[in-house]
């Protein structure tokens, strides 16, 4: 999930930077942060549901046996799953802004290459020749 967020934010920023090369680093970074914010909320929800669904039946059995919830939280594998969920969520929350900052630094201010400009104007043959040189 972390790799998905990073790649999606970077791809969106690359597309924005290629269509609008006049954007400043701050504007491009802000664009990446907006894309990341939209993605992170759904990814965290999916991550939480995936982890919880695996242990929901076990939690129901333990609660039906009369084991108090505090004691359930102290069971090693239950606490490990909770920790895994928290660490995974933290990774998702931090990767989107980090990718947006890196993308803003690396992608802002790039001038489009002559080959890409020629290809976008519909003159693909000249674009390929310019890339070959």
Image (cartoon, grey):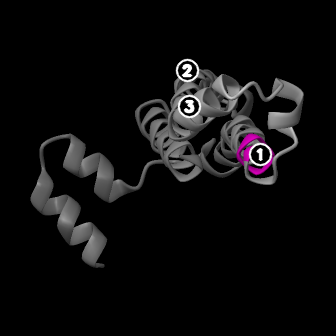
Give the crowd class for mark 1: few <14, some 14-19, many >=20 residues within 10 Å. Answer: few
* Closer to us: 126 or 75: 75
Position of residue 52 measured from the top left corner of the image (x, y, whole percent): 58, 33
Can residue 80 be seen from the camera position used here? yes
State the residue in front, 26 or 7.
Answer: 7
**In this orientation, which residue lies closer to the viewer: 69 or 109?**
69
Label 1 vs 3, first from the N-terminus: 3
Q: Residue at x 56, y 25 (%)?
A: 45
Residue 62 magenta = no
Q: Magenta part of the protein: which range?
A: 78-82
Q: Residue furthest front?
A: 65
Q: Which residue is painted at 83% across and 25% down in the image?
A: 68
- Tag of residue 12: none
From what the image shows, is residue 93 above or below residue 125? above
Q: Position of residue 133 (x, y in %)?
A: 30, 79
Residue 53 versus residue 133 in the image, above or below = above
| Residue carrying label 1 | 87
Instruction: Give the label, 3 or 2, closer to the camera.
Output: 3
Between discs 1 and 2, the one toward the N terminus: 2
Q: Position of residue 14 (x, y in %)?
A: 48, 43
Name the front one of labels 1 and 2. Answer: 1
Q: Which residue is mark 3?
A: 56
């Amino acid at each position: 999930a972390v790799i998905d967020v990073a790649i999606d934010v970077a791809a969106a920023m690359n597309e924005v930077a290629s269509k609008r090369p006049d954007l400043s680093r701050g504007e491009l970074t802000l664009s990446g942060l907006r894309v990341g914010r939209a993605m992170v909320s759904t990814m965290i929800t999916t991550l939480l549901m995936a982890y919880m669904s695996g242990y929901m039946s076990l939690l129901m059995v333990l609660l039906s046996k009369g084991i108090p919830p505090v004691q359930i939280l102290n069971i090693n594998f239950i606490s490990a799953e909770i920790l895994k969920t928290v660490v995974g969520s933290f990774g998702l929350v931090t990767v989107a802004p980090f990718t947006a900052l890196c993308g803003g630094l690396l992608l802002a201010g790039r001038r489009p290459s002559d080959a890409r400009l020629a290809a976008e104007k519909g003159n693909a043959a000249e674009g390929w020749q310019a890339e070959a040189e």
